[in-house]
Amino acid sequence: MSVMGTLARAEAVAGGRAVAAATVRHRYLADRPVVFVPLTTAGESGAPLGALIGTEREAPTLLVVPQPLDRELRFGFFAGLAGVLLPLLDAYGDAVEVEPATRNREETEVCADALQLVVPNSAALEFVRLVGRSTRFLRTVEDPEAPHPVPVPVPLLGRWLTHYAERARTPGSALLVAMTDLLTRHWATGQSAMEDQHLGALLGWIDPAPGLDGGSAAARAQTGRGPDGLLLSPPAGPATDPVFDNRVLAPAMARYDEARAEGGGAVAKAEAEVRRLVGSQLRPTWDDVWRGLDLLRELPEAAHVAERWKRDRWSFTGHRDRIRAGEPPQPKRDDAITAAQKLAGRETAQARLSAQEALDDPLAMAARRLAGEAFAGEVVAVEMAYSEGRRPMPRPLVTVATGDVPQAEPGAKAYRAVPEAKSAQGSELVAVEGVEGGPFPEWLVTVRLTGGMGSGRTPKEGSVPEPGDRVCFTFFEHDARSGPALPDPEATPWTHGGPPGAARAPGDLTAPPQQGAPGGPADSGGPGAPSTPAPASAPAVPRPADAPDPVTAEDYL
């Protein structure tokens, strides 16, 4: 946690209320997001108990599994979930707009918007990933040889949920977001990060009830119980309250099992009771998610949010195209090239997000200034200078009086955001001098502007600051650069898994396995492992086939 974050939490404790951690909203919020509040069976993370889902605050769809141990009822739950989500996904996939051609891209279609899925907390987000992994490979009733067939739309639902869960790992993405993550990005509370995962407690700090401070409201949400002994604010994201499980839910399920065994009209009554109980645990969290959306909508949207949402729309469009083209589901394990591309893309997205948030939000920039990664102040002098060479170009020296201490050596690159410019103005740090005699430490920082002034001998208007102007220079780039290009999949060396998906003949011979790596490349130490070629005298051995992925508990629901 940064110094600014620690200070904000301390202020929240002292003031009894959450402190703003941002002046603008750094994440996109759709006009009609799909809110999804799941509930799982205690001790069975993959066994759904129920869910509330929908786009209307007052009219959610309630899905309940009255007996989570029944495979058919669980599949019916997923079919109901698919019945809500897939029509919405199809509608967003059909509405497109045309992106004009550029120098590097032909005219293409992109979805005009994308479906946004909002869950209560990070545990619920992980449940979405688990459901996607566990359902996208299932065989449907259309397959006569399937031992336990599922309804037709379930595997398609799994593919979409897997894409959303994977996209959620990209910093700044808003296709699938957890409400607790959204709120903690914009407010700092007086409790721990783990306690912030309880949505009711988090909202207690941000917007406490009349007569309560943040700590009291959070404690009431976490531990407060009604006359029946049940929590006033059940977690439901997707955990359940043990008291509810033991006192209420277990007897109701036992009555449902008895009614099914006996048959008759008692089954419907017993099922209705389970539905009522599950709905009572889901509704408080459902209302809390919408309350959090109301609080977030009060913040103005940051300038770069629309750009990041457009990247989400491109991701949504790409997955739609893969599904409509009949491509197979996402693999359980990525090949070397795909894994490296994902990692590089997420690193680039994180650098881009950090820079954009600092440029959009003075509070975020203050943290970078405190760390010495930027400085802001008033221009006190501008000296015109020119580069050497046949065609001298303007290289003015700008001196800034600032209270920030730049953590950079002379010669370091610096950048300044210029209004209405497509990219940041480049500069170079020349000197840093301390000023004595004032009540606070002050520094005179001199930079040489090296770009963004046009191609003439005279800088274009507005490109060079004037004395008295307030400016901010950063030592981080405003536009994140991607890493070096990776080799084509066909050029992947055998030390990294060989050409992914390439067919291997029975007699395919390769270099022998590395020493100390049983089984060959598949068991080696990864990209950092040594790859010393085998001696010429070592005989070639048949290349072992890839072992199938081990079956884990996540593969079954």
Image (cartoon, grey):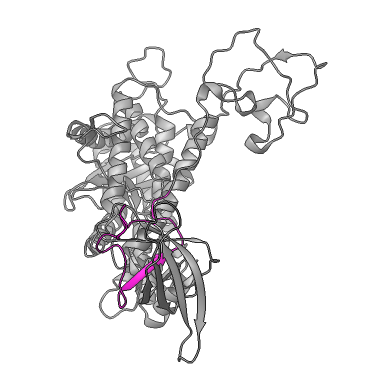
Query: Left or right: where does residue 211 sit relative to residue 429?
Result: left
Q: Is residue 403 visible?
A: yes
Q: Position of residue 44 (x, y in %)?
A: 47, 43
- Quarter the C terminus occupies: top left
Query: Left or right: where does residue 444 sit relative to residue 280?
Result: right
Q: Is residue 457 magenta?
A: yes
- Foreground pick, 443 / 501: 443
Q: Position of residue 9 (x, y in %)?
A: 43, 74
Residue at far front of view: 390
- Foreground pick, 443 / 17: 443
Please, is residue 327 above or below residue 555 in the view?
A: above
* Secondary structure that dominates the magenta span: loop
Q: Is residue 231 visible?
A: no
Q: Residue at x 36, y 47 (%)?
A: 39
Q: Quadrant of residue 199?
A: bottom left
Q: Position of residue 464 (x, y in %)?
A: 31, 65
Residue at far right of view: 537
Q: Residue at x 49, y 46 (%)?
A: 43
Please, is residue 500 above or below residue 157 in the view?
A: above
Q: Residue at x 25, y 37 (%)?
A: 85
Q: Is residue 550 magenta?
A: no
Please, is residue 238 above or below residue 135 in the view?
A: below
Looking at the image, how many numbered discs can be counted on the residues?
0
Q: Position of residue 128 (x, y in %)?
A: 38, 42
Magenta region, residue range: 451-480
- Foreground pick, 224 / 552: 552
- Foreground pick, 404 / 147: 404
